[in-house]
């Protein structure tokens, strides 16, 4: 093997640069480098977009969410005592969600009102999402009918947040009414708009926040909650704590991690990334024909050397390994160069924003995020393709030249 490696290395780094065979060999090496760099860069860009999209959702979503399996709500006291025994829980908040009808002087919309307790501001960084007005984080506002609206809801209802006399009429069906036949089957409550928040369009156009006690009173669900939202001290233990929590609270509750709350979104992002990876891998497979052709031309050029090695007592496997190792070294070198180029470009894009995005987006430059696992997968994929591409010509042509 040392003999085969020594000769293969000489063939790879030969100084006869004017030879057309060596030029083609360098072109195939360049093709491997460009393909590898493209894989690293594209996957890093997908990671960047994925990070931005998920951060937009995660700024509003808890690490773990607990809801009732039957019915809309559960009693807070049934869960809170058990929750005190959980390790790894940094904070938690009980919320009560319900669809309501809001009217502002003829501007109407159906939204989700989310009643939140005093701990909610510990789970969601309200200061970072609050754009105008105030949040009801003091005792005075917590006992009043006040709302903090999503930016989209505020726009649709034409809210004037600076008008202290603004009143929004929130209408909900009575708890015990099966059908809405007359005014006795609904409850109307006046709320004062206090502030406007903005997370991302899906939430901005859907949610309004209100004190939990006022929503419970409006819905006639005193002491009840629709969801328990939990913030963990170590998000890496999300799945482990979810399993412990399911055993602790027992049946009747469904526990979802942050990933499971947006299962479709995560699968969509992953499937798009996988599809692009497969497409680029097929391009790499096509470019591997350059490896086959360059290695074949080298063996044709070195057919006299092959006969000499054979006559000097080298075995067929030794001669075959010379060209197989040469092809593999070329792929290995090209892939390493490609990874260096790809990672370097991603780092420069992160630091300096070399390529900007057109139009109005949440970021000005294409986002990138380097994932070591992705880099390893790219390297392994390229090496496997290179091994297959190097094996075929080294085996077939070696047998042909020795027999002739």
Image: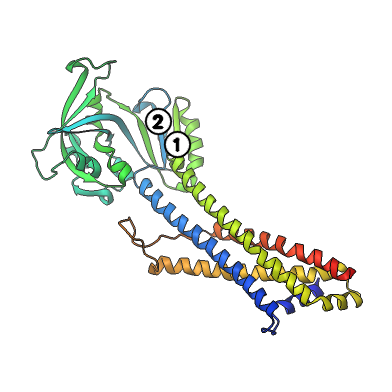
Q: Residue at x 38, y 42 (%)?
A: 62
- For the residues bearing labels 2 and 1, Cβ distance under 8 angstroms: yes
Instruction: In the rendered view, tell whether residue 149 sits above or below residue 45.
Output: above
- Mark before the other along the chain sequence, 2 or 1: 2
Q: Is mark 1 on a helix, strand or loop?
A: strand
Q: Name the residue under label 1.
A: 256
Instruction: In the rendered view, tell whether residue 398 sits above or below residue 239.
Output: below
Instruction: In the rendered view, tell whether residue 395 sits above or below residue 169.
Output: below
From the viewer's perspective, tell me whether residue 241 is left or right of residue 229.
Answer: right
Q: What is the quadrant of residue 92 in the picture?
A: top left
Instruction: In the rendered view, tell whether residue 332 sits above or below residue 92.
Output: below
Comparing 63 with 39, the one in front is 39
Comparing 137 with 309, the one in front is 309
Comparing 36 with 340, the one in front is 36
Residue 51 placement (x, y as % from top left):
42, 53
Q: What separation in Å lies between label 2 and label 1 (alpha carbons)?
A: 9 Å
Residue 271 placement (x, y as % from top left):
51, 47
Residue 86 placement (x, y as % from top left):
44, 37
Q: Name the residue under label 2.
A: 67
Residue 57 placement (x, y as % from top left):
37, 46
Label 2 Cα neighbours within 10 Å, binned few <14 / some 14-19 / many ≥20? some
Residue 136 seen in the current view: no
From the viewer's perspective, tell me whether residue 112 is left or right of residue 165.
Answer: right
Q: Residue at x 38, y 26 (%)?
A: 78
Placement of the C terminus among the 4 image quadrants:
bottom right
Colour scheme of the rendered structure: rainbow
Q: What is the quadrant of residue 3 in the picture?
A: bottom right
């Amino acid at each position: 093997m040392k003999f085969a490696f020594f000769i293969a290395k000489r063939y790879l780094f030969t100084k006869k640069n004017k030879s057309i065979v060596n030029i083609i060999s360098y072109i195939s090496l360049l093709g491997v480098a460009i393909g590898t760099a493209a894989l690293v860069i594209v996957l890093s860009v997908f990671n960047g977009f994925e990070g931005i999209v998920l951060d937009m959702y995660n700024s509003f979503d808890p690490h773990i969410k607990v809801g009732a399996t039957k019915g809309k709500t559960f009693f807070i006291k049934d869960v809170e005592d058990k929750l005190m025994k959980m390790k790894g829980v940094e904070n938690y908040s009980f919320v009560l969600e319900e669809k309501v009808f809001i009217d502002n002087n003829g501007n109407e919309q159906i939204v989700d009102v989310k009643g939140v307790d005093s701990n909610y501001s510990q789970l969601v960084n309200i200061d970072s999402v609050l754009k105008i007005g105030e949040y009801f984080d003091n005792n005075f506002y917590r006992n009043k009918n006040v709302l903090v609206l999503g930016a989209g809801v505020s726009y649709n209802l034409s809210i004037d947040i600076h008008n202290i006399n603004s009143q929004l009429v929130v209408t909900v069906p009575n708890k015990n009414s099966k059908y809405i036949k007359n005014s006795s089957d609904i409850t109307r409550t006046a709320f004062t708009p206090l502030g406007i928040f903005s997370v991302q369009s899906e939430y901005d156009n859907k949610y309004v926040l209100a004190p939990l006690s006022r929503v419970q009173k409006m819905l006639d669900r005193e002491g009840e909650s629709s969801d328990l939202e939990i913030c963990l001290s170590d998000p890496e233990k999300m799945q482990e704590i979810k399993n412990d929590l399911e055993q602790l609270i027992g049946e009747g509750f469904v526990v979802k991690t942050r990933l499971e709350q947006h299962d479709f979104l995560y699968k969509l992002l992953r499937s798009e990334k996988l599809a692009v990876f497969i497409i680029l891998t097929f391009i790499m497979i096509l470019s591997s024909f350059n490896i086959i052709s360059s290695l074949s031309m080298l063996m044709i050029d070195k057919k006299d050397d092959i006969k000499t090695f054979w006559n000097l007592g080298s075995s067929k496997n030794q001669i075959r390994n010379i060209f197989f190792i040469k092809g593999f070294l070329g792929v290995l070198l090209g892939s390493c160069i490609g990874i260096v180029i790809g990672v370097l470009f991603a780092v420069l894009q992160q630091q300096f924003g070399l390529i900007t995005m057109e139009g109005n987006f949440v970021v000005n430059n294409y986002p990138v995020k380097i994932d070591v696992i992705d880099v390893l997968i790219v390297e392994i994929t390229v090496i496997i393709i290179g091994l297959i591409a190097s094996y075929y010509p080294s085996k077939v042509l070696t047998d042909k030249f020795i027999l002739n």
